[in-house]
Image: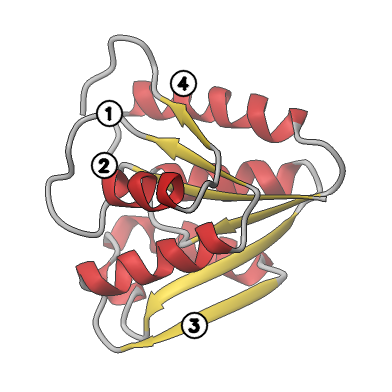
Amino acid sequence: MTRLAITGHRGLSAEVEAEVDRMIRAVVGEAPGPVVGMSCLADGADAVFAQAVLDVGGALVAVLPATTYREALPENYLPVYDRLLARADEVVRLPFEAPDPHAYMEASKRMIDESDVLLAVWDGLPGRGPGGTADAVAHARSRGVPVTVLWPEGAVR
């Protein structure tokens, strides 16, 4: 069994998201044994990863950073979020009320600490704020969890 966690940027252009989807599917498809994917199910990299895990017959673990997390997601993304959440094999609800940087970082830590590999859809730049992709990568590296960075060459966000 391979336990994979995801962290990554949101608000990707359709072109970048399509390439990220291809990259994620390649990694998930090559993972040895049954795959367990851990995701916060946010729009962007999280959702692409969650769908890829489900498409290979893997188990999806949704880690929700806060009780009001759904309300913080883009309105047009909610049907996708609801569909992915309904297909999750396990749902972990963290005890934070508001989805703030601390809650996001705690969700990332939970996923990373229970995973074999962190997939990071990351442009390699410093974070735009605390608790984001760069911080998740730093946490994984500090814990000795391997990080696979996926970012299309020449892409910008």
Helix, strand or loop at disc 2? loop
Q: Which residue is mark 2?
A: 11
> Is 114 placed above or below 65 here?
above
Of marks 3 and 1, which one's residue comes earlier in the chain?
A: 3
Residue type of the residue flagged with mark 2: Gly
Q: Earlier in the sequence, mark 3 or mark 4?
A: 4
Where's the C terminus, which quadrant? Answer: top left
In the picture of the structure, the residue carrying the numbered disc 4 is 19
Q: Is residue 15 left or right of residue 23?
A: left
- Which kind of residue does numbered mark 4 sit on? Glu
Mark 1 → mark 2, Cα distance in angstroms: 16 Å
The 10 Å Cα crowd at callout 3, few under 14, some 14 to 19, many 20 or more, is some
Q: Which mark is residue 124?
A: 1
- Which residue is pictured at 37% across the width and 56% down the height? 77
* Amino acid carrying mark 1 in the image: Gly
Q: Is residue 62 left or right of residue 108?
A: right
C-alpha distance separating marks 3 and 1? 29 Å
Name the residue beneath numbered marker 3.
93
Helix, strand or loop at mark 3: strand
- Which of the two labelled residues, at mark 4 and mark 2, occupies the earlier sequence position? 2
